[in-house]
Amino acid sequence: MKYQVKVSELARKLGVHRNTIRNWINSNKLDAAPAPGKGILLSEDEFTRLCDEFGLDPGMVKFRRMSPEALAGKANGLNVPLRELGERTNRLRPSPQWADVCMTCGSCASACPISGVDGLDPRKAVRLVVLGLEEQLIESQWPWKCTLCGKCEETCPMNVELVSLLRRVRGLREREKVPHPMHKGVMMDLERGNNLGIPQEDFLLLLEDLGEEMAEECCPGFEAPVDKMGANLLVSVNSKEPFAEPEDMKHWWKIFHAAGEDWTIPSVNWEGVNWALFTGDDQAMKTLVGRVVENMHRLECKTLLLPE
Ligand code: SF4
Ligand code: SF4
């Protein structure tokens, strides 16, 4: 027996974001198969394990049960076997959630703030994918004008994962054709530990200076805590602050100070904004996230604060 579960509904029951559920599936933490429309399919064992982990009574969590016959013939009410969706050889169609189930209603286009820019909108983007015209989309500037706000996805009645699709489109572009400031930021972060290439010595001096200012202004004896072992909160930094708006860092620090928070800033790899998320570069994103995790382990912190 399988359970057909809506991602949004499961997320609500577990108290997590729906993207968390998708991340679990993509990283094999959750053994679930995508189903057309709004659902995923979970085995009974997996469903029970998840309920146990989150302290839910499986009997109290009502989801639709799917018999093997229903799965083979009438999955999700479409009245057609899943296999009839056809082999997905197109690079942007590995999952039905990415295009195949679109019914061209146009809700996404109505919600999108950049509909019509360059003659494209999310519905047209999906049609290009379905029709095998993906290269047109990959070469277009439109996916780079998308804010990844997710309004299109929120409004889609078929739960087409438009944001993942558009991010994947960006990832398929040759790196030298990625908008230069974004790609340069990712390369800089990989090379120097922050998007703007601020040297470690300058960063540490700035923290010291700002700490002294704060001690004079309002908090006698204050020093910015760097690499403090076992602090509760690890504070990462948006590099534009030390670069252009260092005063803004003190606003955070004053709140921590007033609240008696136990916090620290790492001396290396302190960048908190991962631009690889926006360039679709999964490998770089993984490396940069790994550095943040490494800082958490190295300093034995319990909670991570990301600035954006
Ligand atoms: S809202 Fe969803 S189903 Fe409607 S056109 Fe957009 S992607 Fe297709
Ligand atoms: S995520 Fe992109 S395509 Fe979707 S609504 Fe926002 S700007 Fe438009």
Image (spheres, grey):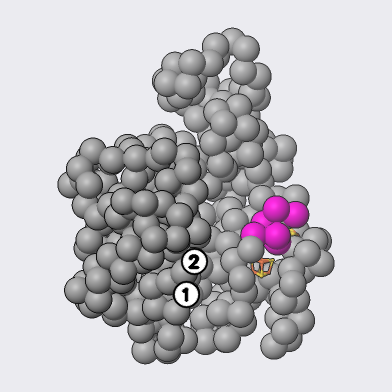
Question: Mark 1 — residue?
Answer: 245
Q: Secondary structure at mark 2?
A: helix
**Is residue 238 shown to the viewer in this render?**
yes
Q: Residue 307 at x, y = what percent? A: 46, 58
The mark found on residue 67 in the picture is none
Q: Residue at x 25, y 76 (%)?
A: 202
How many discs appear? 2
Within 10 Å of the Cα at label 1, are there few (<14), some (14-19), or many (20+) other Cα atoms?
few
Q: Is residue 69 above or below residue 295?
A: above
Q: Main secondary structure of the magenta part?
A: helix
Q: Residue at x 63, y 63 (%)?
A: 149
The mark found on residue 248 in the picture is 2
Q: Nearer the viewer, residue 302 or 153?
A: 302
Figure quadrant, ligand 2: bottom right
Within 10 Å of the Cα at label 2, are there few (<14), some (14-19), or many (20+) other Cα atoms?
few
Q: Which residues are magenta?
A: 150-155
**Is residue 307 shown to the viewer in this render?**
no
Q: How far, Cα to Cα, is label 1 from label 2?
A: 6 Å
> Can you tell me whether the CB of the residue at mark 1 lies under 8 Å from the nearest atom of ligand 2?
no
Kind of residue sitting beneath label 1:
Glu
Q: Secondary structure at mark 1?
A: loop
- The reply, left or right, for residue 286 in relation to residue 84 is left
Q: Residue 44 at x, y = what percent? A: 48, 20
Q: Residue 172 at x, y = what percent? A: 43, 75
